[in-house]
Image (cartoon, rainbow, N blue to C red):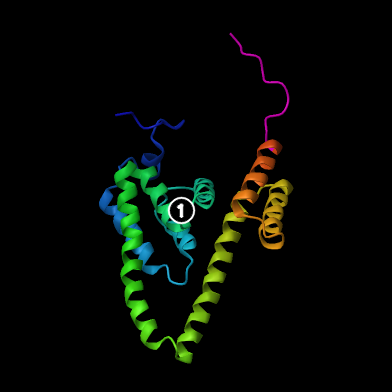
Amino acid sequence: MSEPRLRPSGLPAVARRTGGATVSLHHIFLVFLGIGTTSVGGGLVAYMRRSLVDKQGWVDDREFVRMLTICQALPGLNGTNMAILTGDHLRGPRGAAAAILGVCLPGGLIMVGAAIAYGAHGHHAYAAAMLTTIAAAAVGIAFSVAIQLGQRSLKGVADLVFVALTVIGVNLLHVSVLVVLAVVGALAIWWYRPRGPAPANRR
């Protein structure tokens, strides 16, 4: 079994954030169970950031954005992909299984009940009004987390240009998200490439 990769501090990344203790599978499951139960309104990524970054301290904002980027570039829901990545980051495949089970279990059970209720009462005006309100709240939550991540991740004019190119490509030009990510990602790699001659190795 390979040893965990060490940071400059001499402690594994997760151990440094959890006081040197290994995060238990039970704790991972309960945290994601809480996220899956309370993430009302569709803002799952926002709830995850608040729990994983602010409350648990398992990842920082930079790591969260990196994992979110991977999730958006792959098939599947961002929230479930994020749960898998975080669980694997903490405890490997078993951590990923605990996280995905915790985040999906409450939503799956609640959606069965919601589907039954919607089939019976979805034609009423109050049901449509409630869904409209939840949709508006979901947009607000997503906008809020976008601002929070942007404040911590966007450091210069070039970053804002890449954001604008992405928005234009997806929303105005209606280009596939994968194509936009590939093109803007390639531009970002070219822009942030190492410049100047590499320093000579010293003996």
Q: Residue at x 47, y 72 (%)?
A: 41
Tell me the quarter of the image containing the N terminus: top left
Query: Majority secondary structure of the magenta segment?
Result: loop
| Residue picked out by circle 1 | 53
Q: Nearer the viewer, residue 48 or 75?
A: 75
User: What is the quadrant of residue 22 in the picture?
Assistant: top left
Which residue is outermost to the top?
203
Residue 33 in the image, given as x and y percentages of width and height: 32, 61
Specify whether residue 61 is painted magenta: no
Q: Is residue 92 left or right of residue 149?
A: left
Which residue is outermost to the bottom?
125
Which residue is outermost to the left?
26
Tell me the quarter of the image containing the C terminus: top right
Q: Residue at x 51, y 47 (%)?
A: 70
Specify whether residue 194 is painted magenta: yes
Residue 140 in the image, given as x and y percentages of width and height: 56, 70
Mark 1 element type = helix
Q: Which residues are magenta?
A: 192-203
As drawn, 46 above or below 123: above
- Amino acid found under the numbered disc labelled 1: Val
User: What is the quadrant of residue 196 in the picture?
Assistant: top right
Q: Is residue 44 left or right of residue 189?
A: left
Q: Residue at x 71, y 38 (%)?
A: 191
Q: Residue at x 25, y 53 (%)?
A: 26
Q: Nearer the viewer, residue 167 or 123?
A: 123
User: What is the quadrant of residue 127 in the picture?
Assistant: bottom left
As drawn, 156 above or below 110: above
How many marks are shown on the rendered structure? 1
Tag 1: Cα neighbours inside 10 Å, few (<14), some, or many (≥20)? some
Residue 131 in the image, given as x and y percentages of width and height: 48, 80
